[in-house]
Structure formats: C-alpha cells, structure tokens
Image: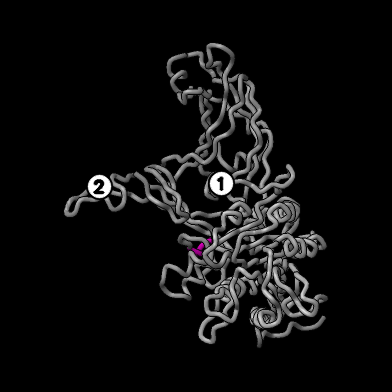
Amino acid sequence: MSQQDGDGHYARPGQETRSSCLQWVSLGVSSPGTHTHTRSPCVCVRARLSWLIAPPGSGIPGKKCGTIILIAEELGNCRDVATLQFCANKLDKKDFFGKSDPFMVFYRSNEDGTFTICHKTEVVRNTLNPVWQAFAIPVRALCNGDYDRAIKVEVYDWDRDGSHDFIGEFTTSYRELARGQSQFNVYEVVNPRKKMKKKKYLNSGTVTLLSFAVESDHTFLDYIRGGTQINFTVAIDFTASNGNPSQSTSLHYLSPYQLNAYAMALKAVGEIIQDYDSDKMFPALGFGAKIPPDGRVSHEFPLNGDAANPACSGIEGVLEAYHRSLRSVQLYGPTNFAPVVNHVARSAAAVLDGSQYFVLLIITDGVISDMAQTKEAIVNAAKLPMSIIIVGVGQAEFDAMVELDGDDIRISSRGKVAERDIVQFVPFRDYVDGGGSPVLSMARLAKDVLAEIPDQFISYMKARGIKPQPAPPSPDPPGSPVPPQP
C-alpha cells in the first residue's frame, strides 16, 4: 500500500512525501511538486500520509474502501544546514557478551503533537562511550525553523535481528543545541520504565553535544544572482551513420517545413540555458566529418569556420552555422567524444574560482567509438567547473551513454573514480515518439536534460568551498528621484 509523492518516490502510511525545491526557473523548467512563496524564497509543503487502505485504482465501484488523511505543514527556513556531533558516556550495557552497540534516532515534533524521524546516526560497535560522526541536517528537517520546538532523541543498542534494545531518551530544542558545547548540552539519557520501577534510578548514561555549526545552504540561483556565468558549448555529430543530409530519411535532413532532431534538441535546451549566459555567445563544434579544404577527418571543428573563435551569436547563430556546415563538410566517422570534452575542459581549467561554469551539450546518433578515452576525459573533467549533457537522436542503442551517465555506478578510468557525476544522458526519441504537443514535448526534454545541472553545479562549488558573491543592488526604476549630492 503506497502512494507516489511529487518526486515519484513512494511513501507508506506514516511516512512523508515532500515536494522538491525549485531549480530552473525559466519556461516551466522546475522540479515537480507544489510550491508556495509566502514566507521565504524557498517554501514547500511536507505532507504525511497517515492512512491508506487500498492502492490507487484497486477500489470497488460503489463501495467505500477507506480514508486518506493528509496532514500538511508549510516548511520554513529552507536554507540553513546544521552540523552536529555527539558522544555518550556510561550507557547501559545491553549485550550479554560484550558491551552495547549504540546509535541514536532524532525525531522532529509535528504541529499535531506527533513525532517524525529526521535522522539516525551510525552504529558504534562494542562500547558504552561512543563518539558518533558529525552529521549535517537541514534546519527545516530538524525543527521546521521553529527554534523552540521539541526535538526528541532516542538511544538504542543495535541488534543484528532488528530488535534493537531501547537504552533511553532525552529531549532538546534547536535553540538549546545552538548554544554549542556547554554544560547546557549534556543530557541525561532516561529510560521511563526503569525510572518507574527503580527508586534509586538516575539515568542510563549521558549524551554530550561536542560541536554545533550552522551555515546557509546556497542554491544554484544564489550563484547566478552573484554573477556566476554559465558558458554553453554545443557539439554536433557529423558522422555518416546519420544518413545523407539531402535525403528525407537522414537525421540531418533540412526540411523547409520542420526542424530536424538535431535542431529541435538544440533549440529546446539552448533557449533555456542561454538565459544564464550574459553575452549569448556560444562556441559550436562538430565532430566525425571530413572538412575543407583538405578533406581531413576532424573531431573538433568549428561550425562557423573560425578555429580561433568558434562562438556563434545566440542559438539562432548556432543553427545557422550548423546548416552551413552541413553544406560544406562530408559526413564520415568515427564517433569520438573525447576531443570535444577535452576542448571544453581546457576552458574550464582556466577558471576555477566559481565565476564561470561550463556546460557542454553533445548531440549524437550512434555508438561511441572512443569509450576509453572519453571515460578518461570525463573523469578528469569531473574536477572542473563543468557538466556534460548528451542527447541521443535516432533509433540506435545507447547503452554506452547510460554508462557515461553514471547515475547507478560512478564512471571510472584507469582505477580512478570520477570526483562528481557530471554527465546527463537522455534519448530524444522518448520525447517525440509518444505524440502530443511538440512544444510540450520539447519543454519536457529541456526539463529532463537540465534537471541535474544545478546539483552538479552546487557539488563543484561545495567541494571547492566557493560561496556565491553578494547579488548586486537592483538598479533604480526609471523616474526614481536622484539622491542629493553631498
């Protein structure tokens, strides 16, 4: 018995569903879920499914199958993240052989008086004096921004069969924890049953807060407002497997009536991302073709013919350069990605201070030919301010692209694992074969293609300790009074 939340995850009775925070705010490119904007720039809704008798679609017509109670609470204080570390002293011994294996469970109190698990520590084996690792938790998850709301902490002895032994509990609040390491943050762990049975019972040990720190969790848009520029580069597959551009069966066919798959994918993604690039100048490269004047095969040629400056003006400029290249080059092969990945990586390596971030869009039709070299290039690029989007067009098998995506298994090369997941792959056919509105299909394509960029961007900035610059003051609107000169 389960119900999907806004992120496509399943929740069971008593569990929570949560909408995601907005990421890309342009032309409907945002995370799924419902958002309200009444209390802060990032306020979402936490909903708890209290009861669900029958799964969707399994009801009996004309018969009541149960009740769903949805308890919602507006989330505040989306931005702060607290980092805490605890230790314990003289906890009760629960294991017959050896000592205890203690861990802690943290609960946030809800507005209706119930409690919801918000964090569980790791288990520290065979000790009555554990020191747990520091952990980070959003303040909204800990107390929903209400600094005086109760936080309950239970201490258990871990058992392999899951029947963990209760050691005791204590309560605190965010306001108390924020005092940091002090006499106020040494808590007696009390087992209520033991306390009732034993007159001389004092406690089952103590838990001490070792450290507390809080910092704002910066968003993608904080960096954009602070001046970080997104540099967008396009790389287009000109291999012969695309078919003769003069024939209507070719993926590169230039129809007078509609855009081909390459142009549609380019427009769908480019028209979103260009809003984050101030100069709207986009380097555009081709690979896998014989180029004039000598007919040599190139995997890194400028679509505008200018090797010194391959940038085109706007997405329309990229499309014009793409059309011109189709008329001047000979489609050939093989399908090599590494040269264009390394091309953008060289630019990214020159700007590591967070002022610029580079996004490479590769549009391709076929099976990659230089897999080993591309994996090595991606592993190296993962250390740089850079992300890679791959859109696969046509009906080829794209198993290798899924491997490069790295969602399930992080990509590696020569024993070295990529520092970050920087590749997002989507097959274009998933957005055009189902019918429906082409405009909506391309909007869905853009949304899915760009979905991982903000998190990849933030992962680079966090790993390098780069904080966003303050946003410049808004210019005075026309007609505002001019302040007097001193």
Q: Residues within 10 Å of mark 1 (few under 14, many from 20)?
A: some
> Mark 2 or 1 closer to N-term?
2
Mark pair 2, 1: CA separation: 37 Å
Q: Give the camera-side residue of 439 and 147.
A: 439
| Amino acid type, label 1 | Tyr
Whether residue 380 is situated above or below residue 265 in the rendered picture: above
Q: Residue 458: x, y in percent?
A: 67, 56
Residue at x 54% of width, y 20% of height: 203
Which residue is label 1 attached to?
Answer: 147
- Quadrant of image for the C terminus: bottom right
Q: Quadrant of residue 479?
A: bottom right
| Residue 37 falls within the magenta-colored stretch | yes
29 vs 56, left or right, is right
Q: Residues within 10 Å of mark 2 (few under 14, many from 20)?
A: few
| Amino acid type, label 2 | Gly
Q: Residue 454: x, y in percent?
A: 62, 60
Residue 155 is at least partly visible in this image:
yes
Residue at x 71% of width, y 48% of height: 419
Q: Residue 466: x, y in percent?
A: 75, 56
What's the mark number on residue 66? 2
198 vs 423, left or right, is left
